[in-house]
Image: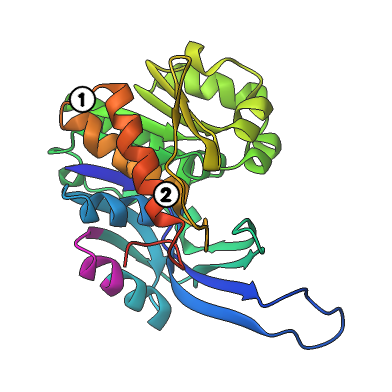
Amino acid sequence: MIVSIGDLVLDISIAPVGALQPDDDSPAVITIGGGGQAANFCAWAAALGDSSRLVTRVGDDERGRSLVADLEAHGVEVCAVWAPEPTGAIAVLVGPNGDRTMATQRGACVGLSPGDLDERWFHDVRLIHVPAYSLFVEPLASATRAAIRLVREGGGMLAVDLSSSAGVREYGATRMAYVLARLAPEVLFATQAEAQTLAVPLESLAQVPVLKLGPTGCRVFGRVIPAPPATIIDSTGAGDAFAAAFCVSWLGGATPIESAERAVETAAQAVTMQGARPS
């Protein structure tokens, strides 16, 4: 079992057809579906054949119930804490090369507290995947640290994804590096922008540091693993697909290099699809 803790939100993806026209209508392809880094990771892990569980807090509203049902239909066990606040949403503006700009309303998920957790959710977990989003704000950050302790007590491992260079800057790069040093993750995922923002060598913070290089591939222990060529439609969720494939392979006994090879292949598949989840 792999567990992730954090966001389950609605993704509204907007891919303009041509340039946006200021103060006027612009044609676009608009899709609506499930999103959130933790939820996307779980969906991809399930699609890759592993058992996955999401621990999250969502609004007790139509949007939240629909998102939970959809993720369960993807084969994910969802441990949802129902909240009076609305379920979050993300507007994703997709550029002509598949690059993304996101506007985020995180909603109910950030209110997850340690008292919401059921210890049974973590007893059979071999690895907990933690987006840095889940460490940036309270009380979600305290709940995440409590979940990590429960997984560690059961002999499980920790993988952290830095999630956002803007998020790291706002939280504080030095503070983030200190938190990571205390958590001592076995695996740490970061993009080049996130790693540069952190300004501390990834190698000093994790047993297996994985630098994501986008269309170029990734770097593990100084070795670049190239990504296969792909026609980029939408890169939303590609990093989550990458992390899920790496973790599933690594738990299956693959080496870090072999896990990275599967990860870049899965991410290359993900960018050819619209939306953040496997179809």
Q: Is residue 276 above or below residue 37?
A: below
Any magenta on residue 223?
A: no
Q: Nearer the viewer, mark 1 or mark 2?
A: 2
Q: Which residue corresponds to mark 1?
A: 153
x, y percent for residue 141: 47, 40
Task: Point out the image quarter for the N terminus.
Answer: top left
| Vertical relation: 221 (above or below) 9 | above
Residue 126 image position (x, y, % from top left): 18, 33
When the figure is inspected, residue 269 is found, relative to residue 214, above or below; the finding is below
- Within 10 Å of disc 2 (Cα), the crowding (few <14, some 14-19, many 20+) is many
Indicate left or right for 195 with 265 as reference: right
Residue lying farthest to the left in this orientation: 124
Q: Which residue matches tag 2? A: 268
Residue 111 in sight in this render:
no
| Quarter of the image where the C terminus is located | bottom left
How many C-alpha atoms fall within 10 Å of the one at disc 1: few (<14), some, or many (≥20)?
few
Pointer 1 with pointer 2, Cβ within 8 A = no
Residue 92 is left or right of residue 156, and the answer is right
- Looking at numbered disc 1 in the image, what kind of residue is underneath it? Glu
Residue at position x 77%, y 88% from top? 25
What amino acid is at disc 2?
Answer: Ala
Question: Which of the two labelled residues, at mark 1 and mark 2, occupies the earlier sequence position?
Answer: 1
Indicate left or right for 252 with 232 as reference. Answer: left
Magenta highlight range: 69-78
Residue at image location 57% in from the left, 15% down from the top? 201
Whether the magenta-drawn stretch holds residue 75 is answered as yes
Q: Residue furthest front?
A: 229
